[in-house]
Image (cartoon, grey):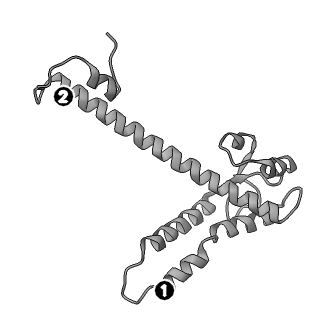
Amino acid sequence: MPIAKSLGKVQKQKGGTKLHPKGRKIKQLTRAQLRQDKLQTNKSMRSDAQSQKLLRLHFFKSFIEKIEQESYTIPEIHDMIVAYIERNSDELDQLKSQRRPGRPSSSRQDSLQMQLEYDDREYNDGFTLPDLRDPQVVKALKAWKGSVGGTNTLVSIRIARDASEPC
């Protein structure tokens, strides 16, 4: 009989309702539960990363639709990245000014501050974005419908804050 790893299969197997606390069945159920928790955690992490990638692509798509060009230079791409990092700075400043002295910051302010620090750290190490120097990638990004599958046609590059060329 094959080894059952999923919790649903383990729970469906024959057995009485009384389980010994140190029995094999309890150990099997525990392993299956831990595996299910690990799989769920990994799934949610992948989903969060994918949604962040899509939000980033939407921002750059809206940015290139405002400024119509065939391709962009490295200094223009750096300006776009700075605009992306500072996209929530107005709201963050407003939340800081509304907070009374001596009071803790709001959860929204904390999340915006953490996002700003994360993006800034990523920009120092190498910020991943579509290769806007290539006219075909710019054209593909403009035609992108916002789906996950459409991101496969976009060639990505990494640009660091102090680099004049992609990493």
> Could you tell me if residue 7 is visible in this image?
yes
Rendered position, 49 above or below 161: above
The outermost residue toward the right is 70
Q: Position of residue 100 (x, y in %)?
A: 41, 88
Q: Position of residue 26 (x, y in %)?
A: 18, 28
In the picture of the structure, the residue carrying the numbered disc 1 is 98
Q: Nearer the viewer, residue 14 or 63?
A: 14
Q: Position of residue 52 (x, y in %)?
A: 58, 54
User: Could you say whether the residue bearing mark 1 is in a helix, strand or loop?
Assistant: helix
Q: Nearer the viewer, residue 146 or 76?
A: 146
Q: Residue at x 47, y 71 (%)?
A: 108
Rendered position, 35 above or below 111: above
Q: Which quadrant holds the N terminus? A: top left
Judge from the rendering whether residue 74 lies leftward or rightward of residue 42; answer left or right: right
Graded by Cα atoms within 10 Å as few (under 14), some (14 to 19) or many (20 or more), the crowding at tag 1 reads few
User: Could you say whether the residue bearing mark 2 is in a helix, strand or loop?
Assistant: helix
Amino acid residing under circle 1: Gln
Q: Residue at x 75, y 41 (%)?
A: 153
Q: How many marks?
A: 2
In the picture of the structure, the residue carrying the numbered disc 2 is 26
Instruction: Decide which of tag 2 and tag 1 comes sooner along the chain.
Output: 2
Judge from the rendering whether residue 79 lies leftward or rightward of residue 93; answer left or right: right
> Could you tell me if residue 167 is visible in this image?
no
